[in-house]
Amino acid sequence: MPTINSVDLQFSEILDALPNSVIWLRAIRNDSGQVVNFRVDYANKKAEEYSAGKYQVAIGTLLLNDRQDQALIAQTIFTSLSTIVETGKPTEEVYFNTILNGWYLTDRSKLGDGVLSVTRDISPLKEAEQDKNKQTELLQTILDTALNNIFVYEAIRDEVGQVQDFRVRLANAVARQDVMNRYGKEVLDNSLLDLRPHSRETGQFNLFSQVIETGQPLFAQHYYPDVKEWYDTSITKLGDGCVVTGINITQQKEDVLQYKQLSDLLNSVLDNSTNGIIAYEAVRDESGQIVDFKFIAVNKAASLLARKTADELIGQSMLDVFPGNLQSGMMNMYVHTVESGERTSMEVHYNYDGLDMWIHASALKLNDGFVVTFSDISEEKQIQRQIRQSADLLQTVINNSPAALVLYEPIRDENNVIIDFRYKLANPIAATATGRPLDYMQGNTLFTMFPGSAQKGFFDHLKQVWETAETKQYEHHFCDDGVDLWAAITMVKQEDDVLTVFQYITDIKRAQQELERSRAELQTVIDTSQTGIFLFNPVRDKSGEVVDFRFQTANRQLASYVGQEPKAVIGALGSTWFPDYKDNGMFDLYKKAYQTGETQRFDFHYDGGGIDAWLDILVTRMGDEVLVTFGDYTPLKQLQQQLEASVVELQRSNRNLEQFAYVASHDLQEPLRKIQAFGDILQTQYAPIVGEAGADMIQRMQSAAARMQVLIKDVLTYSRVSNRGEVHVPVDLSTVAREVINDLETVIDDKKALLTVGSLPTIMGDALQLRQLVQNLISNSLKFAKPDRLPEITIMSEKVRGRESGFVVSPADSNRLFYLVTITDNGIGFDPQYAERIFQVFQRLHGRSEYQGTGIGLAIVQKVVENHYGYITATGQPGEGATFRLLLPSPSN
C-alpha cells in the first residue's frame, strides 16, 4: 500500500473513510520460521461493521484461537493466508454473507510479513445481474416460443463510418438451427455476408442499411435464392443495428430470437483496492474562499487513473490534473463537503481530461480538506444500459411480432384452485385481433372478457399447461364474444405464468373451407355430368418409366361402367377396373399425352371386360396429371352402322334401277322404232287398202308410239339426274340461261314470248343438270302459256340468309348464304292445293289432249335442286300465272 506523505494526516483516519473493509493480519512464526498463526494488527471501521456478530474482528485478535465455533472457518482462512505469504500471489473471493444478507468481494495480497484483506460490498452489482438475468430469461423464453425467425444485427462500419457488413448479435433458437441446417455454421458472431455472401446482390444488405440510416421500419417479402425460399420480413432499427423478423411464407415456419449473452464481467480491480482513494487539502484565496484543492495522498488505483505516480501528484493542484472537475460538478460537491462537514456522494459521467467513464465518488471532510473514494462504475452503467436495451428489444419484439403474445397469470380461490387467468401482458396485435383496447385487456380476466371462449376449452388448456408444464400446440376457432377468427396456438409455462402465442390463420382456414366447398361443388357437377370425367396420376416403376395410371378423381359416369360408386374407383389403378386398357392401345394414348404434353382427341371402340362402347375421348395434361373426358356415342355409332348398311343396300338398289332404266330405254325403244317404221309403211303403201278407218287406227298407233318414246327418254333423264354424283364446278347461271333461250328461240318466236333475265349468280354445281333445270322451267312456262295472252317470263335472283328466305330450312342452313332465283310467268297458273303434286313423277294437272308432256319435267327440276343441296317451291293461281322459287347455296359459305 502506498505511503501517505503527510505529517498531519493520520493513516487510520484515511482508511476509516473507505467504504470497504480493510484488515491487515501479521504472520506469527515459530522458532523455525514456520507460520503458525495470524494476528489482526489493523482493521478499519468498515471491517468492524462487516464482521459484526459471530466473526467479529478486533485488533490483536488471533485467527486460530480457542473458540470451537470458529475453528473450521479459521483453519480454511489460515491455509489461504499462509499460501499468500509464502507464494506472494494475491487471491480474490466472491461470497454471500448470510449475516449481512449481501454479496461481497474480498481481495487478499501479501503486505510485509502479513496479508492485507480488502472487502467490498458488491450487492448492487449482483442485484443488477440478477435483474438482467430475469429480463434475459423472459426475453429468451418469449423469443424461443415465437414461431418465426428473429435476428438482431449490429452494423460493422469502416473508418469513415460506412456500413461494410452486419454482425449477428442475437438469433433465436429456430433461427440458429435454421442457419446450421442450411449453411453448417453457427449464426452467432458471424456476419451477414459470411452467412449469405450474395446479400448485396439480392438487396437484403441494402434494406438493412436503409433502415439503419433512415430509422424507418420496412416490411417486405424477400426471396433468398441460395435456399430458394420466400420470407415476409420486418426490419426495425435498434441502436446501430436492426431487428429482423422473418416469417417463412414458403413453409409457414416461424422462428424466435435468442438473446446473446451480454459482455464479460467487470475487469479485475487494479491494485489491492478496487477503489481509488485521494486526500485533498483546500486551497483558499485571500477572502477565504476555496478556489482549488491540493493532492496530499493518493493510492495506487488513483495514480493509475491519473497516469502519474503518487510522488508526482502529491502537492499538485487538483484542477491542474483534473480540470474536468469544474464542468462535471464534482468541484462544487467537494467545496460543499469541506464547508458543511456533510458526507457527500454522486455518480457522474466523467468525460474529461482524456477519460470517459462513470464514477461513483464519496467525499468525507478531513481537517480543512477531504478524502474522496471513487469507484469505476462504468461496467454497472453498461449493464444497466444493456438491461434497458434488453427491455427495449423485448418491447420491440413484442410490438412488432406478427403473432399475438399474451402472458396469463393464474387466479386462485381460497382452496388454491385455479379459477381464472388474468392478462398480465399482451401485445398490440392481440388487442387488435380481439377488438379490445390494450389497456383494457392488461389486468382484466379471461372469463370477464371472453366467457364463451373460456368455457369452450381455452381455459382448460391454459390450466393443463400450467399444471403439467408441458408445451401445448393446437388450432382453435374463436367464434364467441364478438370474435370470429382461427388461431394456431402455442402455450408454454413461464415461471408462474402461461405464455401464449396466437398465430392468426383465419384467412387460411376460410380459404380451406372455400376450397372444400368448391371441391364438393365440382364433384357434384362432374358426378351429374353425362360426360365421363376422371383425373389420372402416373404410376412409375423403379426406372421411372410410366407403367400405369391411378385414379385421382372420377365421376359417376366413369364409375358406372364397372358398376361402382366413384369413391370405390378413386385411388385404384386404371388396370384394376379396366384391365384391357393396357393392351388395347388406350394406355399408350394416355401415356403419349402425358409425356408430350400434347392434347389428344380420338374415337375409340372399347370392347373388353363386359364393356362394348364407342367413345369420343379428349386427353389433356394438367401439371403432373392427365385429365380425361369422354362422351359415349355407342347408340349413334350403332345407328350409323345401320345407316351405312342401308346406304349399301340403297346403292345396290339404285344400281339395279339404273340398269333397269338403261335396259328399258334401250330395249323398249327398239320395238317402238319397228312399230313406227311399219306404221309409216302402212300409211304410205297400204292406206288405200285399209281405208279411212284403218288409216285413222294407224295414225293413232303412231301417236301412241311417239308418246311412248318421249316417256322412255324422260324416265332415262330422271334416272340419270337421280344418280348423278356430287360435283364442284363453278357454273354461271346467266350463261346457262342465254344458251337455253337460244335453243328455244323457235318456240319463243312462235309464241311471241317476252323473256326478261336479270343478273344471275355463279354457283358450284353440275353444268348439265343446271342446264336441264333452267330449260325445263322455261319450257314449262312456254308450254302453259294462256292462249289469249302473250307469254311474259321473268328470271331474277338475290342473295339472302337461309332464315330470311321464306323457306323452311334446316337449323344448319339457318345462317347460311343462298341465292334466291325466281322464275315468274303469266300463264294459266294452277290451283295452290297442287303445289306439291306438280313435282311428283308422272303427275299431270291437265289432260294430254290439252298440253303435251309426260309429267316428269318438274320432277327432274326438283331432283336437280336437291342434288345441289337447295330448296324449291311453286305458287300460282288459276289464270294468273305461276312462280317458281329456287334457293341454291352460295359458294362464299
Image (cartoon, rainbow, N blue to C red):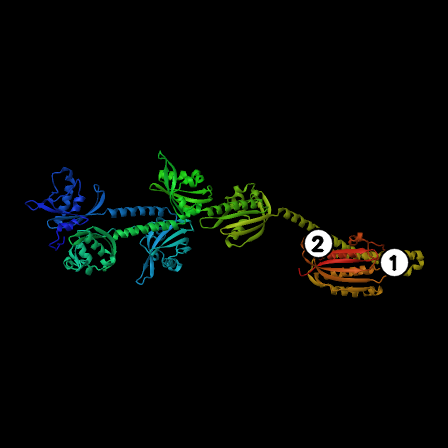
Percent x, y for residue 855? 80, 55
Q: Residue beneath label 1, please?
A: 679
> Quick check: can you spot residue 410?
yes
Q: Residues within 10 Å of mark 2 (few under 14, many from 20)?
A: some
Cβ atoms at labels 2 and 1 below 8 Å apart: no
Q: Nearer the viewer, residue 12 or 356?
A: 12
Residue at 33%, 62% in the rendered image? 162
Closest to the observer, 586 or 262: 262
Percent x, y of residue 7: 11, 54
Q: Is residue 260 visible?
A: no
Q: Mark 2 and mark 1: span between their CA atoms?
A: 52 Å
Residue at 28 percent of width and 46 percent of height:
130
- Of residues 799 and 218, the one drawn nearer to the viewer in this rendering: 218
Q: What residue is at 6 percent from the left and 45 percent from the top?
A: 32
Q: Residue at x 53, y 55 (%)?
A: 598
Q: Is residue 565 left or right of residue 741?
A: left
In-image side of 711 versus 533 (left or right): right
N-terminal of the two: label 2 or label 1? 1
Amino acid type, label 1:
Gly
The x and y percentages for residue 35 are 10, 45
Q: Secondary structure at mark 2?
A: loop
Of helix, strand and loop, which one carries label 1?
helix
Q: Is residue 759 left or right of residue 470?
A: right
Query: Percent from the top left, x then y, of residue 220?
Result: 42, 55
Q: Is residue 442 above or below residue 322?
A: above
Residue named by callout 2: 809
